[in-house]
Amino acid sequence: MAVIEVKGLSKTFKVKLKDKGFKGSLKAMVKPKYKTVNAVRDISFTVDKGEIIAFIGPNGAGKSTTIKMMTSILFPDKGSIKILDFDPKKDRKKLSYEIGTVFGQKEQLWTHLTPYDNFKFFGAIYDIPEKAVEKKIDELKMLFELDEFINTPVRNLSLGQRIRCEIVASLIHNPKILFLDEPTIGLDPVVKENIRSLIKRMNKEYKTTIFLTSHDVGDIEKLCKRVIIINNGQIVLDDSMDNLKYHYLNKKIVEAKMKERVNLDDEDGITILKDKGYNLKIEVDTTKRSVADAIKLLNPDNIIDINISNIPLEDIISSIYQNKDQL
Amino acid sequence: MKKYWFIIKTEIMSNLQYRFDVIFGFVSYFILLFILFNLWRYLYSDTSGLINGYSMSQMMWYVVMTEILWMTLGGRKFNTKICNDVKTGNITYNINKPYSYIGYSLSMHLGDILVKGVLYVLIGMLIGFIFLGHFPSLSIIEIIVVIIASLLATIISIFIIMALGLISFFIEDATPFYWVYSKLILILGTIFPIEYFPTVLQKVLNFSPIYVVSYGPAKLFVDFSWDKAITIIGAQLIYLVITYGICKLIYQKGVKRISVNGG
């Protein structure tokens, strides 16, 4: 069952232009010039209940604008959005009871208060009876392991602890969909991993649909089964994580240390990435050429050391950012 | 309404630990009163005489009251907060929460200043009593009316300052509007009652915000009458509706402009 339906969504912004220098400033005051920026262009997608979906793209791709339209912060110019059968444009207040948002770069907790007082505050904001709030806090305290610091003022918490509390605060009103905007930004690898497993656990426990944006490939790889990539305001890829990987797993990276110099040129199915005489790095397209073939070209007797690996997901994604035609 | 009360309560809790600014406020409050008291002593060479209908002790209590209102208000801090909320885009994070930004900001600021207000009242009364040896003669019910008028005055002031801050939606820097407003209140609203000004100006001031945010409660405090109480509270209620309406209008127009500023 689709809980998010986006159809033909577009949004343009008018950006003021200014010539350089003082003269330019004066001119802009008298006769301002504007440029139209197409932030989001005709995008459509649906998200099913309980899905964890990654919505990614380079800076300025239109991610934030799309999320803001979905959470009723911005109004779309064209197209329609349905979130749990609500139109964010018209049913802003009703929708706010059904969704939660966490912005990794934005604190929504009161820093002078303890997490516990903060959660009570959010409970009141969402009109939840006091007893129900306390029950929910207890439940989330266990799930997110907050026991140690639930009574410490937020300003004294570490970043990882704070993010955990931010997520809990956004879950107090039992949202059906959670929008997570870069939840692991600035965290160390151990804490990142911990947050990811907590998000996964929450998704399993409450069947919360999670709409995640992140620049961290680890987040996407470990959490999401489906990924939507947006660039220049358009969707360039909407596919399952498995398909995305499978497509690129056809390519292998072979790094070899040689006894003697090898003169190798680009051939069908083989691309030379680095050639330093005795050290070679080549990409093999296994749909055209087998890895064994490539090794034969190098001459196995000549090889001192060899390493065969998949293309890192990070590289896959950045190549999609740079050129969607490569797909 | 319950949620807004919770916001007030939470803000009080959040602020109880940080009260250094209040102590500094007390010092400047004390210095200001001291200077003005001496000024009135000088002007009222005959302490039993009246100037523009006010006795010396009424003038002193008038200043105690207007200064309590002004110092409690913390207008500059609030104005800066609203301007920053708009400029940094923080305001957008309030849009998808189930409360109104205006109600939320009002409750936050009331929570911020409530404890401070009580302390200023205590200190103001103490200073006035030490200098003058008596309190204005008011019955309990009259005191309650003065408190209501003071609360209304504070809420109207908060709406006015909020509206001035929300202008940030449309121009780069809206702080000068508050600067002008605060100076007008200081000159025309805190030191002298409206009766001290030329007749033409009095007519203007009687319809200006100064009448409801500063003069009104202080006048009732030093020279209470039920006629005046009804006029003043009536005017305050009208102002309350108007200033809230203006905030709402600016906010609604402004929020649509957020889309211009982008994601």
Image (cartoon, coloured by chain):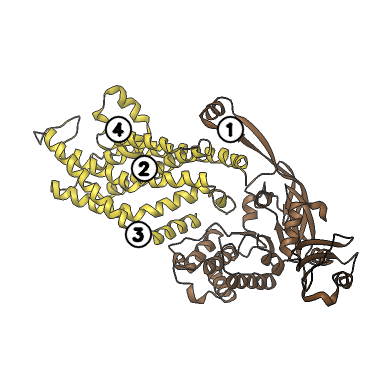
Chain colours: A brown, B yellow
Q: CA distance from mark 2 to mark 1?
A: 44 Å
Residue A163 seen in render: yes
Residue A165 lies left or right of residue A269; in this view the side is left
The answer to whether tags 2 and 3 share a subunit is yes
**Residues tagged 3 and 1 counted as in contact (Cβ below 8 A):** no
Disc 4 is attached to a residue of which chain? B
Q: How far from the left and from the top, in percent, is residue B174?
A: 45, 37
Disc 3 is attached to a residue of which chain? B
Label 4 or label 2, whichever lies nearer to me, is 4
Label 2 or label 3, whichever lies nearer to me, is 3
Amino acid type indicated by mark 1: Lys
Total label count? 4
Q: How far from the left and from the top, in percent, is residue B86?
A: 51, 44
Secondary element under disc 2, as helix, strand or loop, is helix
Marking on residue A90: none
**Residues tagged 4 and 2 counted as in contact (Cβ below 8 A):** no
Marking on residue B188: 4
Residue A52 seen in render: no
Query: Which residue is disc 3 drawn over?
Result: B18
The answer to whether tags 1 and 4 share a subunit is no
Amino acid type indicated by mark 4: Leu
